[in-house]
Structure formats: C-alpha cells, structure tokens
Amino acid sequence: MRRILITAAAGLALVASRAPAQSAAADSAAADSVPTVEFEQMNPKPRLRNWPHVRMVMGNEMRRVIRGPDQQWRVDVGVIIEPDGTPSTLVVARSSGNAAVDSAALAVMRASRYTPPRQDGHPVRVRGILPVTFESQPSAADARPYPR
C-alpha cells in the first residue's frame, strides 16, 4: 500500500470553480487591474476545493514516478493563484533532483483549484511557493517481522 501526501504551505488548500470565459482583451484588461499579493499576507488563505480530483492525479503521477517502498520526494512549486482560483505561472522553485518527480508535481498543481482569493473583499492574485510531497510507505505485509 502506498500513502500519498500533498502538503501546502501555511495551510493553503485546493479549489474547483472557474470564472466564465472572457475575451483575450477582457482578460488582459482585468489582469492589469487585479493586484498581486504574497501568500503570507493573505488572511484567510485560499483553500483547496477539489481534493478528490487532486488526490486521483497524485495517485496516477505517483505510480508513474515512485518505484518501491520508503521513497519520499519533495518539490517546491512557485505558483500564482488567479482571482478565479486557478493556478498559473507554475515553476519549480526547488527541484527534487528527479525530472519525472518535478514534472509530476507540476501536473498536480495544474489540477488544483482554490477558493477565489480576496483581500478586503476585492479579488486578488496570490503568489507563493507551495511544497508538493510524494511519499510511499511499505504495506502492512512488508512491515511484518521475519519468522523466528
């Protein structure tokens, strides 16, 4: 049995709604008028809203990159959370040292959706670095002591 963990800095949690589509001109005009706030300054913090989907994506990615028990990989992902709660501008801020694991962490973050960030009642972008941790642990059968 493998255990999957995703950790989020300072309690950031994931989301699942999206604003209606707009034209490219409207998007760029709206983007220029929305301030960007550092994650640490947000109160309340955006929360993950689509955990079941993210857990499924993590499981798929984990099966692709982790081989064997007792492995742990951590990737710090730089992200901007848009006013509608979707992540954008994903970059690997600190690599795990394994390109496949780094790619898996980016896939997990792309699948994430957050509560729309607001500050003083106004929509904002949030910038921060979130850790994504993949961990496998031995199954109960593997943990049994050897017969005497």
Image (tube, grey):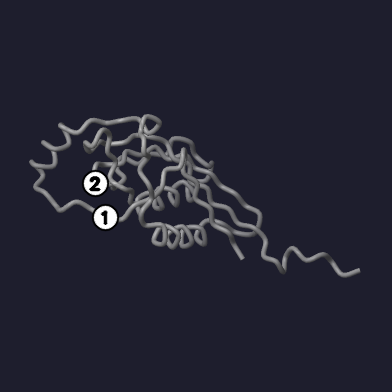
Residue lying at the far right in this picture: please name it.
148
In the figure, is residue 87 to the left or right of 130?
A: left
In the figure, is residue 106 to the left or right of 145?
A: left
x and y percentages locating residue 2 in the rendered image: 59, 62
| Number of residues whose C-alpha sits closer than 10 Å to that of mark 1, classed few (under 14), some (14–19) or many (20 or more) | some
For disc 1, the marked residue is 17
C-alpha distance separating marks 2 and 1: 7 Å
Which badge, 2 or 1, comes first in the chain's sequence? 1
Q: Residue at x 41, y 47 (%)?
A: 13
Q: Residue at x 44, y 63 (%)?
A: 56
x and y percentages locating residue 122 in the rendered image: 21, 36
x and y percentages locating residue 25 in the rendered image: 8, 41
- CB under 8 Å between callouts 2 and 1? yes
Between 41 and 113, which is closer to the camera in this rendering? 41
Residue type for callout 1: Ser
Residue type for callout 2: Asp
Q: Residue at x 58, y 53 (%)?
A: 135
Between 129 and 125, which is closer to the camera in this rendering? 125
x and y percentages locating residue 96 in the rendered image: 53, 42
Q: Which mark is residue 141?
A: none
In the figure, is residue 84 to the left or right of 66?
A: left
| Number of residues whose C-alpha sits closer than 10 Å to that of mark 2, classed few (under 14), some (14–19) or many (20 or more) | many
Quadrant of the image for the N terminus? Answer: bottom right
Residue lying at the far front in this picture: please name it.
120
* SS category of the residue bearing label 2: loop
* SS category of the residue bearing label 1: loop
Q: Which mark is residue 84?
A: 2
Give the answer, above or below, for where 145 lies relative to 107: below
In the figure, is residue 75 to the left or right of 138?
A: left
